[in-house]
Every structure is written in structure tokens, then in C-alpha cells.
Image (cartoon, grey):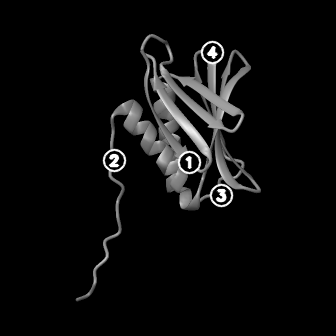
Amino acid sequence: MPIGNEFCIDSKVFKLAFDGGRVDPYHIMECRGRFRGSLWIGIKGLRWILDIFVKIRTTNLTLEGFFVFHKDGYRVLKFSCLANRGGRFVEISEYHSGTHRGSIRIPEGRKGARWSVFEFQIRKCFLGEIQKHSTVSTSSGR
């Protein structure tokens, strides 16, 4: 029986599920109104996606038009940063033998805050990692 987690980013609901009986057991689903996006990925693809999120959060480069690919057998994952009138977003697409199989879109938010939420939830649910984000200490000066 699959296990999982559900969380919201803006008006999108993301569902994370794990089905250990599959070659690619990690399932990421996106729902917004009638739109449904979905990815099935393995551990290599999952770690690659998380590494790219770390890279784009820590870079000062312009990210619009940024894209990278990860090839794993007959599968290709595409990670791209795009923008529209709603702001910047990341699109992760899955292709198998050249055919588009699924995709999800994650909005950036202010200073990448929504990307951080997405990354945190993926790490927590799928990898059992809980990373403490560095907080800025404030002194009252009293």
C-alpha cells in the first residue's frame, strides 16, 4: 500500500506517494482545479532534482531560460526555469523513449520560498531528512 503526504503551495495541491513495488517508486502529483500533473521517478532522479533546487537557490544568475537534463536509461528528466505574468516557476518534465509522460510546475514565490517548501517536503516525505533552515539572529540591544 502506498504511503504519502499532501501540502499546498498557493492554489496548488501537491501529493507525494511512495509505492515500493515499482521500479520508479516516488510519485509526485500536482492538482490545481482540473489540471493534474504527475511524475514517477526513481531515487537517482529524486536526488538529481533536489540537487538542482539547491543550485538554483544559491546562485545569483538570471534563471529564466535555464534548463538541464538528466538521462537515466530510456528516461529523460528535464528541469527548466521559466517565467510568465504570474512570476517565475520551475517545470520538471519526464520523457520516456522520446514521449512526454508527465510534468509538474512549482512557483518560485518571494526569494524562492515556495521552491524551498517543495524541496523540504520532498526531503521529509521521501528521504526522511529534516534540514533546519538557518535563521537570522536578532538582538534587542538591551
Q: Nearer the viewer, residue 51 or 121?
A: 121
Q: Name the residue rendered at 51%, 18% in the picture.
A: 24
Few, some or many C-alpha atoms within 10 Å of disc 1 (few <14, some 14-19, many ≥20)? some
Q: Which SS class for mark 2?
A: loop
Marks 4 and 1, how far apart in space? 31 Å
Q: Where the C terminus falls, by quadrant?
A: bottom left
The spot of residue 134 in percent (x, y) is 35, 60
> In the image, which disc is placed on residue 9?
1
**Residue under numbered circle 4:** 74
Say which quadrant the N terminus sits in. top left
- The residue that label 2 is drawn on is 131
Q: Which mark is residue 62?
A: 3
Residue farthest along the bottom direction in this orientation: 142
Label 2: few (<14), some or many (≥20) within 10 Å?
A: few
What's under tag 1, amino acid-wise?
Answer: Ile
Q: Is residue 124 visible?
A: yes
- Between the residue at mark 1 and the residue at mark 2, the CA separation in whole angstroms equals 19 Å
Secondary structure of the residue carrying tag 4 is loop
